[in-house]
Amino acid sequence: MTSGDPSLTIGIEEEYLLVDLATRDLAEDPPPELMKDCEAKLAGRVTSEFMRCQIEVETSVCTSIDEARGQLADLRHTIAACAAKYGLAPIAASTHPFAEWDRQRRTAKERYLAIANDMQYVARRMVISGMHVHLGIEDEPLRFDLLSQLSYFLPHLLALSTSSPFWRGENTGLHSYRLSVFDELPRTGLPPAFTSPDEYHRTVAVLVGAGEIEDATKIWWDMRPSARFPTVEMRITDMCPRLDDAITVAALFRCIARMLARLRRDNQRWRSYSNFLINENRWLAQRYGTTGDLIDFGRGASVPFGELASELLELIAEDAAFLGCEADVARAAAIARDGTSADRQIGVYEQAKTDGADEREALAAVVDHLVSETQMGCAPG
């Protein structure tokens, strides 16, 4: 590609839920010393989240997937080591299997208190975590052009990441119940298709001028132009307990963006589809993860996710080679075949029940499984 193409630098944010290793429940009020320990070791890369039972981390701006992987592994390992001193552990899942949301305590930050006051009951249920991926796209018109095209692929990325089948001790029947909780907030869901950056800025200005939001950080679409950086921020995905899965999703997003930029350079573009249609695939991904079908709008037919994943890997093969992440994106085929964290969690639960565990014991087994997977492959080198 040419010098005018986007850098596609990458930054990843993850939100972890803290569990008590004795009870397997969420740590409703972790000791303040824990955050101090984390901040001392990860200065500038860790912060508190909306609920006290959460910790958020972020990589620096990375130029390769391998660099992002190394940083995420270090972040997970460090948080786990710090938490262990207090009898706690992080889980990289989007919901806790049995915790009660109404027992959780909010973090006493001005921004979070304002959100809680504004959103009321809806905000109190936000005991959920997600993974956000930033891609550097320096040219603003290009950023918005790619933003509108990338929306088509958001359900595919969601399907590969699903990790929230349980809520308050019940199997919801959804692979990503997190999305149902998050969609109760305003200004969520798929991003609108803007014809230009100016249209977007005018739209935001209406809400700011009306006093409804302070700035664009209060817009929580599945993907958005960052309000602080020259990036597109993908936000639709669940947390991935396995580091390898998280890296696969991030690498796939990056390769798709490069593929679309490459098409644009050759005066081509991905066909535009309405949010109405894309929302149908969003629902199918939320409901079934990789175990069901998504709609191929070009064919006008439902197609098994594994088949669509194979086609997508063919589309981005050139881009994966250019970015040096062929093995990372190839793993998407294995996730499509073997299932996501949601499938594994349900399997652990059902096996525990078969082995004679009661309801709480089976759910506790899921927590232990998540603790183990979160730290898998994150030991220091």
Image: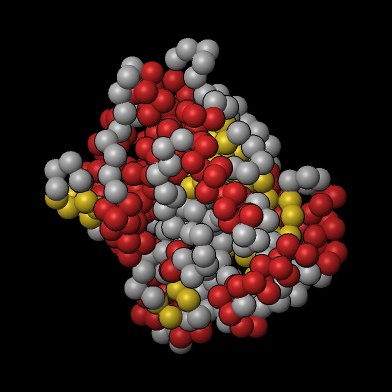
Q: Does 125 appear above or below 178?
A: below
Please report the residue visible at 68 percent of the width from the left and 74 percent of the height from the top.
117
Please report the residue visible at 48 percent of the width from the left and 70 percent of the height from the top.
184
> Residue 115 location in percent, x, y?
66, 67
Residue 304 visible at all: no
Who is closer to the viewer here, 374 or 227?
227
* Left/right of residue 62 with respect to residue 187 in the rendered view: right
* Left/right of residue 289 with respect to residue 86 in the rendered view: left
Q: Does 108 appear above or below 6?
A: below
Res 349 quadrant in image: bottom left
> Residue 85 location in percent, x, y?
79, 64
> Residue 122 location in percent, x, y?
56, 75
Residue extending furthest top? 2
Res 32 quadrant in image: bottom right
Who is closer to the viewer here, 332 or 44?
44
Q: Quadrant of the N terminus?
A: top left
Display colour scheme = secondary structure
Total marks drawn? 0
Q: Does 254 appear above or below 333?
A: above
Please report the residue visible at 27 percent of the width from the left and 36 percent of the height from the top.
271
* Left/right of residue 278 with respect to residue 223 in the rendered view: left
Who is closer to the viewer here, 242 or 154?
154
Please report the residue visible at 43 percent of the width from the left and 69 percent of the height from the top.
180
> Residue 140 location in percent, x, y?
54, 30
Q: Quadrant of the C terminus?
A: top right
Residue 303 visible at all: yes
